[in-house]
Image (cartoon, rainbow, N blue to C red):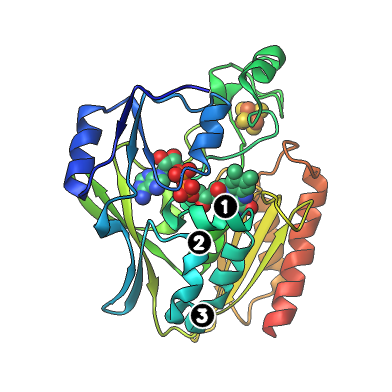
């Protein structure tokens, strides 16, 4: 495990961004630490400086902002259940949060950290000596993808369970950065490149997550995993439908980015499913085979449509 040489705990966003500017290129932000510390243990994350965001009040809590519910990025997954607007308008979000890790992890892990947890692959989430013995792959400085034998692309999978459900609700993000602030659609955060899976500068901080209120969403969340108790996803599917009969499907765990397919209630469901399967670039880098996970997309989506009555 790499020990940090500098540990900083800013009390404001401005202070955090100043530290980020000062240590650009060799620091990482820390929120709950449940993902980044595991990666540091495996020496997949080696920044010498950690900037702990946990004491910044602007990143805490929630509020209603015009027609949005704005959740601070430091909100712990276990605390989401205390927000009545989530229970009434977005219950699938609570189901997804409840499917992350274990009770202890959910009491520590934040929603912002969840959206940014590192992509995973059975050849990457291994100790340094394991990876050295097997030969480093594209994601850790090598020149070959072990999973595919190819030299060009890494297909490590995005495993955030919160991202698909938030995307299905058209969530947006507030990003604060050294060069200014911006609001983006959550689905645009994910690049599709397994080596650098986020379209986000190193210094940017997610300050809040925005959910559109009063669209009367209904959604079905499903997660494939080997153990129901504590396991990263091998496939997460969410299907939402809103009052305008828009259908939005988001898949996690089968591609370096969240796969998103949109349609309408009247659309041919088989065509929507086949679009999802085509979009999912799953490879054999998971405990379940690629073939099985792709078949399960069909099973999960067919059942979700039935449960939604569409
Ligand atoms: C045993 C185990 C099981 C797990 N199971 C699951 C699971 O089933 N589903 C799942 O989705 N995840 C799972 N995780 C991964 C992880 O615990 C969660 O994704 C968690 O929500 C990460 O949040 P965190 O606050 O701990 O993030 P951290 O580990 O603190 O940070 C994660 C990343 O986000 C960055 N970051 C954090 N907050 C911000 C911010 N506001 N702005 C900019 N950058 C930021 C950090 O620099 C880091 O790169 C599991 C982890 C473990 C150890
Ligand atoms: S998909 Fe290939 S390049 Fe990416 S982490 Fe896995 S083995 Fe490495």
Q: Position of residue 209 (x, y in %)?
A: 37, 62
Depth check: 62 or 160 in front?
62
Q: Which residue is at a point 81% across and 46% down the rendered structure image?
A: 291
Q: Which residue is mark 2?
A: 77
Q: Tell me, yes or no, if residue 255 can be seen here.
A: no
Asked if the residue at tag 2 contacts the one at tag 1, i.e. Cβ–Cβ closer than 8 Å, the answer is yes
Q: Which mark is residue 60?
A: none
The answer to whether the beta carbon of the residue marked 1 is less than 8 Å from any atom of ligand 1 is yes
On the image, the x and y values in percent for residue 60 come to 32, 61
Q: Is mark 2 within 8 Å of ligand 1?
A: yes
Q: Which residue is mark 3?
A: 87
Q: Nearer the viewer, residue 77 or 272?
A: 77
Q: Height in image: 204 above or below 163? A: above
**Pointer 1 or 3: first along the chain:** 3
Q: Can see residue 239?
A: yes
Nearest the eye: 214 or 39: 39
| Vertical relation: 303 (above or below) 279 | below
Q: Label 1: which residue?
A: 105
């Amino acid at each position: 495990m790499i020990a940090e040489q500098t540990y900083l705990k800013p009390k404001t966003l401005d202070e955090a961004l100043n530290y980020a500017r000062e240590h650009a290129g060799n620091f990482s932000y820390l929120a709950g630490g449940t993902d980044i510390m595991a990666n540091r243990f495996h020496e997949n994350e080696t920044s010498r400086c950690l900037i702990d965001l946990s004491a910044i009040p602007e990143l805490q809590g929630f509020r209603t902002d015009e027609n949005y519910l704005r959740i601070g990025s430091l909100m712990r997954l276990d605390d989401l259940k205390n927000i009545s607007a989530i229970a009434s308008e977005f219950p699938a979000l609570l189901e997804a949060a409840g499917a992350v890790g274990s009770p202890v992890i959910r009491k520590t892990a934040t929603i912002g950290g969840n959206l940014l947890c590192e992509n995973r692959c059975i050849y990457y989430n291994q100790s340094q000596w394991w990876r050295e013995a097997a030969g480093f792959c594209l994601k850790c400085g090598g020149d070959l993808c072990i999973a595919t034998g190819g030299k060009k692309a890494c297909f490590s999978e995005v495993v955030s369970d919160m991202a698909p459900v938030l995307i299905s609700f058209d969530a947006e993000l507030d990003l604060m950065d050294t060069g200014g602030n911006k609001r983006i659609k959550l689905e645009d955060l994910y690049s599709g490149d397994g080596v650098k899976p986020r379209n986000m500068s190193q210094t940017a901080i997610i300050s809040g997550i925005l959910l559109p209120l009063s669209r009367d969403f209904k959604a079905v969340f499903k997660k494939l995993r080997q153990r129901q108790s504590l396991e990263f996803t091998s496939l997460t599917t969410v299907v939402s439908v809103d009052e305008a009969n828009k259908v939005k499907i988001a898949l996690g765990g089968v591609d370096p980015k969240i796969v998103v397919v949109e349609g309408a209630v009247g659309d041919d469901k088989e065509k929507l499913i086949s679009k999802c399967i085509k979009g999912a670039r799953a490879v054999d880098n998971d405990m379940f085979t690629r073939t099985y996970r792709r078949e399960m997309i069909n099973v999960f989506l067919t059942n979700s449509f039935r449960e939604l009555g569409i």
